Amino acid sequence: MPTSLKTLRLKLQRRLLVLDRGFDRHLIDPVAVQRVDKYALQEGYVSALWQAWCSFCRELLIHSTQGAITASGVNTTSPHSACGEMEIAYVAKRLSNRLSVNAIRPLVGGHQEHTWGDLSKLNLVASGIGCSNASSILSGLSACLRIEDLQLCRNASAHISKSTIQSVRASKVRYQNTSFRHPSDMMSWVDPVSSDFLWKSWMEEIELAADLAIQ
């Protein structure tokens, strides 16, 4: 039976709710007093949010390609509807690298897949894989204005180096209250559009993108 894209949206919503409640607890009653503990906690939240976004994007594209039911009640189709999950992952990786898709074979593991939440790659996949709901997916992706900075925060936190720190510094021009000692401090920067924490902008943007993409 085809998967309802609403189900994927509800799954994402539950994950986001848990993470957002954790973020609020961290602000109101911080349990991490030592700096090393604070950074570890922040990095964990940022990583979990990035993984939730990536997981949603992966499931959205794979199920849409195989045949799913949109929130509008329409069955999706694609030229690759008969392919298995890892075969679609192979097609998606080729598309994400701007390569042609000839003989299709399954990837042997998740470690070979492209980064599903990376907008530069995700747009190429959504545009090229032939899903009948591609316009809805691309509409959702077009609403993403801050997700690239979530990716930056996650990568800089996981791979601290001179270049990643410089990228974090360069992103400060887009926000307010941008002091930081660790890349994960980005989550507490202030978005001038909403006057709220950047973390909240990430959450709201993911919610909006998902709502548009499943239509």
Image (spheres, helix red, strand yellow):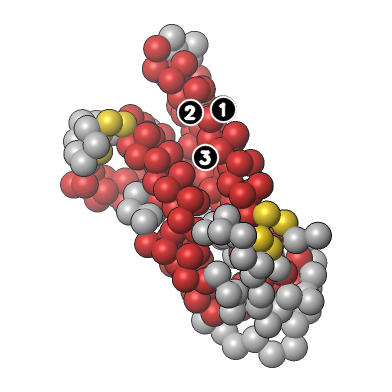
The quarter of the image holding the N terminus is bottom right
Q: Amino acid at mark 3?
A: Leu
Sequence order check, earlier mark of 1 and 3: 1
The residue at 47%/71% (across/down) is 135
Please indicate, yes or no, whether residue 111 appears anywhere in the rendered image: no
Q: Does residue 183 lie above or below 84 as drawn?
A: above
Circle on res. 20: 2
Cβ atoms at labels 1 and 2 below 8 Å apart: yes
Residue at 73% x, 75% y is: 81
Residue 136: x and y in percent read 48, 65
**Residue 6 pos. (x, y %):** 61, 49
Give the structural element (helix, strand or loop) at label 2: helix
**Closer to the observer: label 1 or label 3?**
1
Q: Is residue 52 left or right of residue 77?
A: left
Q: Residue furthest front?
A: 73
Task: State the separation of the CA atoms marked 1 and 3.
Answer: 10 Å
Task: For marks 3 and 2, give the CA distance.
Answer: 9 Å
Foreground pick, 36 / 210: 210
Residue matched to label 1: 18
Q: Residues within 10 Å of mark 3 (few under 14, many from 20)?
A: many
